[in-house]
Every structure is written in C-alpha cells, then in structure tokens.
C-alpha cells in the first residue's frame, strides 16, 4: 500500500478534530466528577511550521560561514526541484536519496567578505513553490604569492589566446548540470591523506611568471609527487574530458553531477576515456609534467557550477560535509 502525505484537506480535518476535542473537554464537568478544574489541554497547532502540503520545510547549510575559495552544502527536505542563489549566481539543487534536494554553493576567490544571503526557490513534493533564505558569512582568505620562472619555450604557451581558448573550453564543461553521481565521502586524488609537505602550490595562490605582474588565482591545488604516481577520482561520476591540452597537459575531468566537477592535469598518461563512468577512487591516470608545468605534479581542481574552489578545504571536513 502506498502511504500518502496528508493533503491540505487532511490538515483542515485534523484542525477541526482538535477544535472539537477542545470544546468537548472544556464542557462543564458533571456533578459526579471531581470538583477540581480540568488542567488546560496542550492545544497548540503550529500553523506557521506547517507547509501548504502538510509537511514542514527544512533547509540546512553544512556551515554558516565559508572562506573565499570555500563551499557549503545546501539541503532541502521533501522537495522535487529547486535552486539557490547567492552573490549573483544561481545553483541548481539535485535529488538526494531521501526525497529531498542537495547541492553545493561555491564561494569564489574574489567574492567579497561579509554577509551573503542564500535565496532558495523550491518546488515541494506536493507541487507548491516556496521560498526560503539563509545567511552565510564569507570570510577572507589570505592568498600566498608564487614567483615562477618558466624555462625557455614553456613560456610561449602563455600566449593569451591559447590560454583563453583552453579556459573557454573548460568553462563550457564546468557549466554542465547532470543528476547527482557523487557519494557522501570525497577522496584524495592521490589515494592518501594529503599532507602539507606534498602541496607545491595552494589553491588561489597568486602568481608572477618570469618576473611579471602578480595576478590571478591558481585554480587548483598542485600536489608534487614522483612521475608515475597514480591519480584517482575524488568521487564517482562520468568522464567528460580525457585528452592532451596545451596549458594543462594530459587532463581528465569528471562530472560528479549537480554542477560539481573535478579535474586532474599535467598527467604523463591517461587511464580513462571521455564518456566512461567511474567509481570513487578509480585510476584516471599517472602524474607527470605535461603542458605548462615545471616538474612532476598533479594539478587537481574542483569546480562548483563554474566557481573553482579549494580542494583541500573540500576534503578536510572543515566545511561540514
Ligand atoms: Zn596547478
């Protein structure tokens, strides 16, 4: 038998039943009854907490603050579809396993510190559209600066047209939206706990190439390890790119659904092909120094609906997911 949630009319019936009960209970006691007055009944109908389809809406954030370059997980109960908007960007929420919605909001490296309002628009299971809002505090991240000397020839790849063309291609991929494939636990792309000693360039680091001006933000985390070290998917998903790029070298991008992507660049070899589904922790390639790179390392990046965020924060549990 299929259990149905109470409809609007069921709520009205429930209220009428309670009201009747109150009238009955407050009727004068008969002479045979105890003369003490009856204790007051706990008659409270929390109408404000009852949604129009008869169930309350719960919206939760994994954290009430996020650093620049951070992310927050947003959950909404008992809803079929919805979006969350913050700082001028709108993120789609996707179905979770409990009849609700879940998704991530990314905070960009240049987003302003201070209070930000998350505005949700949700289509509830009963079909009603509801809105909700939550406040998020964006905290400032102190970025480091990296001065990089590129060997002759490698710098030629910094031709702005080449860099832009590749960036445009990645932006188009990162704008994709598919159903949820990620599982709750995210993994290190090296299959080991990531220690500070292995990080050769942090997410968001600002850069100066060959004595040039300081600018930009490093879009990923560089993990310096020996060439040939296996690289693994951070979570389950589908391979949407696996090929040689001019700047990022041999790169794999995995679509985890819900606008979440992970990228693995500069690899010496690739172990997957575009279109293939992968499980969490599956080998995607081996670390190398292809493309615009000064030595063997894995450039690992995470994108939330096109906003690049810090993979180390993503893994360390500090953001509540
Ligand atoms: Zn990098």
Image (cartoon, rainbow, N blue to C red):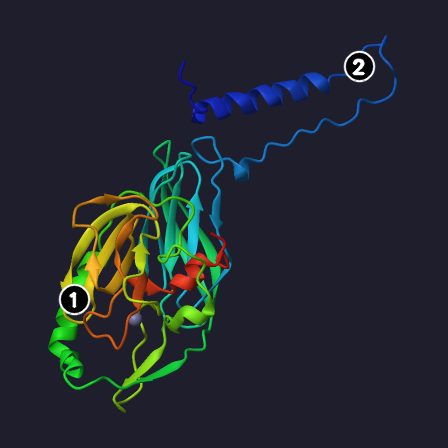
Residue under numbered circle 1 = 168
How many numbered discs sit on the rendered protein? 2
Q: Residue furthest bottom?
A: 211
Q: Position of residue 247 (x, y in %)?
A: 18, 71
Residue mark closest to the camera, 1 vs 2 = 1
Give the crowd class for mark 2: few <14, some 14-19, many >=20 residues within 10 Å. few
Observer able to see residue 114: no
Taking the spot 16% from the left edge, 66% from the top edge, the residue there is 168
Front position in the image: 254 or 25: 254
Q: Residue furthest right?
A: 35
- Report the quarter where the N terminus lies: top left
Observer able to see residue 315: yes
| Residue 17 falls left or right of residue 266 | right
Q: Position of residue 101 (x, y in %)?
A: 38, 42
Q: Position of residue 13 (x, y in %)?
A: 51, 20
Which of the two labelled residues, at mark 1 and mark 2, occupies the earlier sequence position? 2
């Amino acid at each position: 038998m299929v259990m149905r949630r109470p409809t609007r009319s069921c709520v009205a019936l429930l209220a009428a039943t309670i009201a009747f009960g109150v009238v009955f209970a407050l009727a004068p006691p008969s002479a045979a009854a105890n003369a003490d007055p009856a204790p007051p009944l706990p008659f409270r109908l929390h109408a404000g907490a009852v949604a129009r389809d008869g169930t309350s809406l719960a919206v939760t954030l994994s954290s009430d603050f996020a650093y620049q370059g951070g992310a927050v997980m947003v959950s909404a109960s008992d809803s079929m579809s919805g979006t969350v908007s913050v700082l001028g960007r709108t993120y789609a929420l996707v179905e979770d396993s409990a009849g609700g919605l879940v998704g991530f909001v990314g905070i960009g490296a240049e987003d302003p510190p201070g209070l930000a309002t998350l505005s949700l628009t949700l289509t509830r299971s009963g079909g009603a559209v509801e809105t909700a809002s939550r406040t998020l505090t964006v905290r400032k991240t102190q970025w480091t600066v990296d001065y990089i000397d590129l060997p002759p020839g490698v710098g030629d790849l910094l031709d702005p047209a080449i860099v832009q063309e590749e960036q445009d291609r990645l932006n188009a991929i990162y704008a994709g939206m598919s159903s949820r494939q990620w599982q709750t636990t995210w993994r290190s792309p090296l299959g080991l706990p990531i220690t500070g000693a292995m990080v050769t360039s942090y997410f968001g680091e600002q850069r100066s190439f060959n004595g040039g001006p300081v600018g930009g933000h490093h879009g990923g985390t560089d993990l310096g390890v020996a060439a040939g070290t296996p690289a693994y998917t951070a979570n389950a998903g589908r391979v949407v790119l696996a090929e040689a790029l001019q700047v990022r070298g041999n790169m794999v991008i995995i679509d985890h659904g819900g606008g979440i992507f992970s990228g693995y660049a500069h690899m010496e070899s690739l172990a997957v092909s575009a279109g293939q589904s992968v499980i969490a922790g599956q080998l995607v390639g081996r670390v190398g120094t292809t493309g615009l790179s000064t030595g063997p390392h894995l450039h690992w990046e995470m994108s939330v609906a096109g906003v690049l965020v810090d993979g180390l924060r993503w893994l360390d549990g500090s953001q509540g997911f």
